[in-house]
Image: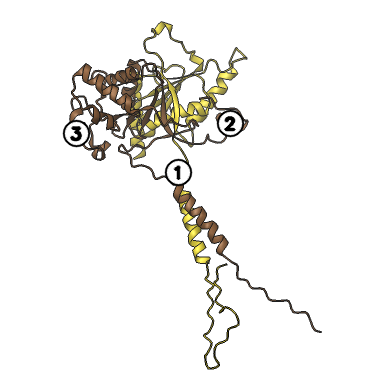
Amino acid sequence: MGRAKLPRKSTNIDMTAMCDVAFLLLSFFILTTKFKPSEAIAVETPSSVSSKVAPNKDFVLVTIDKDGKVFLTIDDKQKRETIANSLNATRNLGIDVTAFKNASFVGASFSGLKSFLAISEENRKGDQLPGIPCKDSTDNELIVWMQVVNEAYAGAKMDLLLKGDNVAKYPAFKNVLTAFKRNNIQKFQMVTNPENAPAGSELYNKSMSGEKQEN
Amino acid sequence: MAELDTSSGGGHKKGPGVKKGKKLSTRVDLTPMVDLGFLLITFFIFTTTMSQPTAMKLILPDDKVKPEEQNKAKESGALTIIMGDDNHIYYYEGQLKPDASNFLSASYNGENSIREIIMKKKVQVRSIARDPSDPEKDLVIVIKPSSKCNYKNVIDILDEMSINVVKKYALVDIFDIEEQLVQKSDANAKSSSN
């Protein structure tokens, strides 16, 4: 019996289209990847279930590194200028206002501020700097800093952030809190990494039932 | 698509003596290229950080309020959590007994975790609540970090408050007697683990 021969089809698939898609996606991901800017102060933040995104502009950030050293970052350049001027006026520091305006963070005592500002920006590394003295209530320069910051922000909204390292000891955190409390700052936010609420917990059940998290 | 037209255009025949060159296929196998492409895509997908840092709100109590104006916690609804060195954690319910018999040890996660203890306490407070509209009114958790504990411990416990939806909690300075107890227990835990 003669059977009709099926024409043999080639198993070669044209890969070009797939290749196009692959490289399109590739270029998308390459272009959208933002590499973490190398941070002057290395801090590993703990995680929390909070879902509120930390503000990324107009903030005042107090950083506690792993040795408990305290650094202050003021985001707004204009405010930095105001603060430098008022420090020069009230405490007679004689610091270079332009240098202070361009410094991304402060990490030295008032007496060491001049030499701190003399270091070039890229050489200011958290682990080599002394940090703002904030040991106990008698020797707590952060109180003065917060006071000056408060004055500079008088009337304007200030987002106060606290970023602490996992292994920083509690006394360092407490001294920062003291500085806040002394200036009647009762509200602030702590920078954390996001984390999901553990399954089975009350918050988890709440979010599953569609209730909004309050914070 | 991925091939070039190599056939010589038209029917222009070469002379009789001229040999025809063998036609080579210009079809390129794109499979390895696609493989490489997807490999890179996976790499970039995994290295892209989508997560932005979040912020946790904390409102501090006003220290200047006189002690007699401060809220008093009911003993039945109070739970004190003390964080010690090296991720140790302790708690007691109500007031600390003079012989410290209710000073107990817990852990951050796993067995006997602080979460279970908070949940148990909540159930207990609910069972004896007199006001049915707000059964958890009496529950107050007092957080006392010792000088040895680290920042992560404090955040973890504050986070535990939001995980367990505890409405009333306070970050309070530790008493000397508690600090000593913590030090003793920490030392015990260390010697027993060695």
Q: Position of residue B120 (x, y in %)?
A: 54, 26
* x 33%, y 16%: residue: A183
Asked if marks 2 and 3 fall on the same chain, the answer is: yes
Q: Secondary structure at mark 2?
A: helix
Q: Which quarter of the rendering shows the C terminus of chain B?
A: top left
Q: Which residue is mark 1?
A: B49
Residue type at the position of mark 2: Ser
Please name the colour scheme applied to the rendered image: by chain
Q: Along the line of sight, which residue is nearer the eye, B188 or A114?
A: A114
Are circles 3 and 1 on residues that touch, CB within 8 Å? no
Q: Is residue B4 visible?
A: yes
Q: Position of residue B95 (x, y in %)?
A: 44, 16
Q: Residues within 10 Å of mark 1 (few under 14, many from 20)?
A: few
Write down the chain letter for disc 2: A
Q: Which residue is mark 3?
A: A118
Residue type at the position of mark 3: Ala
Distance, label 2 to label 1, CA atoms, is: 24 Å
Where is B48 relative to B57, above or below?
Answer: below
Distance, label 2 to label 3, CA atoms, is: 51 Å
User: What colour has chain B?
Assistant: yellow
Asked if marks 3 and 1 fall on the same chain, the answer is: no
* x 32%, y 15%: residue: A182
Q: Which residue is mark 2?
A: A207
Q: Along the line of sight, which residue is nearer the eye, B4 or B50?
A: B4
Where is B44 relative to A40, above or below?
Answer: below
* x 56%, y 21%: residue: B124
Query: In the current view of this chain or complex, which residue is farthest to the bottom?
Result: B17
Sooner in the amino-acid sequence: mark 2 or mark 3: 3
